[in-house]
Amino acid sequence: MPDGERQPAVRGSYAKGVARRQEILDRAIEVFARRGSDRTSLRAIAEEVGVTHAALTHYFGSLEELLVEVYRESERRGGDGVPVPLDVTPTELVRRWSDANHEVQGLVQLYSTLVASALEEGHPAARRFATERFARVRSEIAERVRHNQSAGRIRADVDPVAVAALVVAASDGLQTQWLLDADAPQDAALSLLDQLLSNPAAGRPSA
């Protein structure tokens, strides 16, 4: 039989595989949003997700790779598909993240677990995930800082890249404190950061 006659079947099989992987990922997100990332075996997760251990291994390779894909997919779904306008300041953006995270504590714990794993030897998937994500988020926030500096909302004497790194540190640090203590003053801390970054002249009446 000519190769061309077999291609539709191959494409159909591939499409089914993609759909099956997405189905497993959808279910895994529900599980991790509810239970967090408790360090457990791939086999135990497979049982809770409702698939075989062999299926998880086939589609994701390892527990760490599954955790990375679960978080990436949940992050892609985090917004409503509409980009946040650049006029929104970095601290206000973090407030939005914080409000959304309060609804999915398990996924917040999952993120913290991945970052912690990235600092250990023998976790290449977690390290690659954390390194790439930090670089991307810093770049996006730095662009937001520059935009707000040009609009006069953020002081002009601060380096956008350094501010971005500080905002990421504040976001992750406050998130960790919230996981340990729901009474941690997240909003007050972000208000203080906003005050420190705000352009003093923005609130002054013109002469």
Image: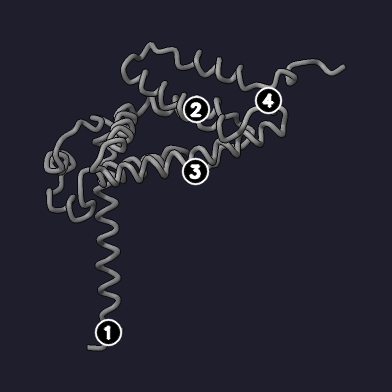
Of badges 2 and 1, nearer the viewer stands 2
Q: Earlier in the sequence, mark 2 or mark 4?
A: 2
Q: Position of residue 63 (x, y in %)?
A: 20, 44
Residue 155 visible (yes or no): yes
Badge 2 local density, few (<14 within 10 Å), some, or many (20+)? some
Q: Earlier in the sequence, mark 2 or mark 3?
A: 3
Image quadrant occupied by the N terminus: bottom left
Residue that badge 4 annotates: 155
Q: Earlier in the sequence, mark 1 or mark 3?
A: 1
What amino acid is at disc 2?
Val
Q: How far apart are marks 2 and 1 (CA)?
A: 53 Å
Q: Position of residue 148 (x, y in %)?
A: 66, 32
What amino acid is at disc 3?
Gly
What amino acid is at disc 4?
Arg
Residue that badge 1 annotates: 3
Residue 143 lies in what quarter of the image?
A: top right
Residue 123 lies in what quarter of the image?
A: top left
Which residue appears at 56% of the width and 29% of the height? 163
Which residue appears at 57% of the width and 35% of the height? 161
Of badges 2 and 4, nearer the viewer stands 4
Q: Nearer the viewer, residue 79 or 175?
A: 175
Residue that badge 3 annotates: 81
Q: How far apart are marks 3 and 4 (CA)?
A: 30 Å
Image quadrant occupied by the C terminus: top right
Q: Where is residue 169 in the image (x, y as percent from the top left)?
A: 45, 27
Q: Distance between the residues labelled 2 and 3?
A: 17 Å
What amino acid is at disc 1?
Asp
Residue that badge 2 annotates: 94
Q: Where is residue 106 in the image (x, y as percent from the top left)?
A: 29, 29
Residue 127 lies in what quarter of the image?
A: top left
Q: Earlier in the sequence, mark 2 or mark 1?
A: 1
Residue 27 visible (yes or no): no
